[in-house]
Amino acid sequence: MASPQEERELFYASSDIPFDDRPNLVAEVSDLNLGLMREHLVQVGSSLADRASQLDTEELADDLQLLAGPPEARHPRNVGILMFCEHPERFFRYARIEVVDMPDPTGQGMTEMTFAGPIQRQLRDALAYIESYVIKRKTFKRDDRAESEVVSNYPFKAVEEILSNAVYHRSYQINEPIVVRITPESLEVTSYPGFDRSITDEDIKNHRFRARIYRNRRIGDFLKELRLVEGRNTGYPTVYEALAENGSGDPVFEMDENRGYLSVTLPVHPAFKEKDTAEARAKRRAEEYEARVLDTLNAADGPLSLTELARALGYKGITRRLSGAVEALVASGTVEAIPDPSPARPRFAPRGR
């Protein structure tokens, strides 16, 4: 018996009108943004760009085939809402990209960025963020060649292809965001649902990703015009090529039995692996605690004794962890110990304060 997800896939495949090309009956023509449509035409170098300044929202949307229905009851197609509406989340909840950086499995130091708005803007902004703040490079001088070797923790081209494919092929009827999860060991992109059934498990095993069914043909056409996705079935071959050139391992694909989701995981390049993960995590936790102690000293009206510092941090008494952190800060020169002859115990304050 087919699962509910499989039934939906069969329904989409048998429908004459793909989901992204269907009218959105709860949206109005006024929900489309004229500026976004004009901007798109300029970006792709369309011959319609010059004439677009003379057209109103409905006329231009009609020329772009973004409307459906009779003249008296016209509605934007779903592709129009997703790409040319400033707030598509009003109609498609969780139509967004979340980038979560987890340097520690406990969640300490975790940062999360959310990218919303038109899906092409989400994709561009998320990729720009990842390239600036996630991608790191190391340069090695090799004895057997004059040129230096540069490797990345994750080749950006591979990340770009995987995330672009997720935006292109996800179902916008499933209320889940695309999530990019970064840990010290890997970068993982999860979207919903998984590969359609026209790509078999054997195909995936042999790196053959020839889809027979496209969920979002219109979205794909627009993204191809913007050069945000590759041509037919060329995305994952590009991923493998970029990983091989960087000296990285192959991606890992994970789906549940019903293919309700797809997670594509890129392993971090060996040059960026931490030699002792437990030691590195302990060091990070110590540094974060020292920063907390320093912030407390900075916020105080004057130097504090260990007892006063403990109370300011919410402790009932002095802990070994606190004593160790203060000793480390004094040893590094960040904090200075100020003699206080009255209680015969030092007080502590940020150096130079």
Image (spheres, helix red, strand yellow):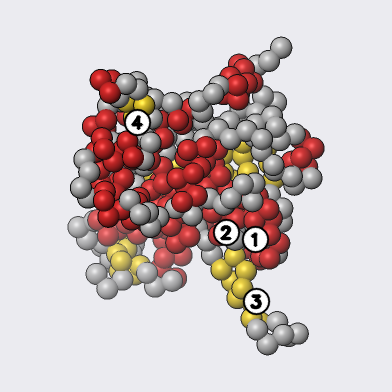
Closer to the camera in the image, 349 or 118: 118
**Where residue 328 sits in the image (x, y, percent)?**
46, 65
Secondary structure, mark 2, is helix
Disc 4 + disc 3, Cβ < 8 Å: no
> Residue under circle 3?
149
> Residue under circle 1?
242
Closer to the camera in the image, 275 or 251: 251
Residue depicted at x 26% and y 38%: 59
Direction from residue 196 to residue 76 in the image, left or right: left
In the displayed orientation, state which residue is furthest to the bottom.
146
Q: Measure the C-alpha gap from mark 2 to mark 4.
A: 35 Å
Q: Tell me the amino acid under the disc marked 2.
A: Lys
* Nearer mark to the viewer, of 4 and 3: 4
**Where residue 60 sits in the image (x, y, percent)?**
28, 41
Residue depicted at x 32% and y 36%: 62
**Where residue 145 sits in the image (x, y, percent)?**
72, 85
Q: Measure the C-alpha gap from mark 2 to mark 3.
A: 17 Å
Q: Tell me the amino acid under the disc marked 1.
A: Ala
Indicate which disc residue 67 carries. Answer: 4
> Residue under circle 2?
157
Disc 2 + disc 1, Cβ < 8 Å: yes
Mark earlier in primary sequence (4, 1): 4
Mark earlier in primary sequence (2, 1): 2
Secondary structure, mark 1, is helix
* Nearer mark to the viewer, of 2 and 4: 4
Direction from residue 187 to residue 198 in the image, left or right: right
Q: Measure the C-alpha gap from mark 1 to mark 3.
A: 15 Å
Which quarter of the figure is the N terminus placed in? top right
Q: Tell me the amino acid under the disc marked 3.
A: Glu
In the displayed orientation, state which residue is furthest to the top.
1
Mark earlier in primary sequence (1, 3): 3
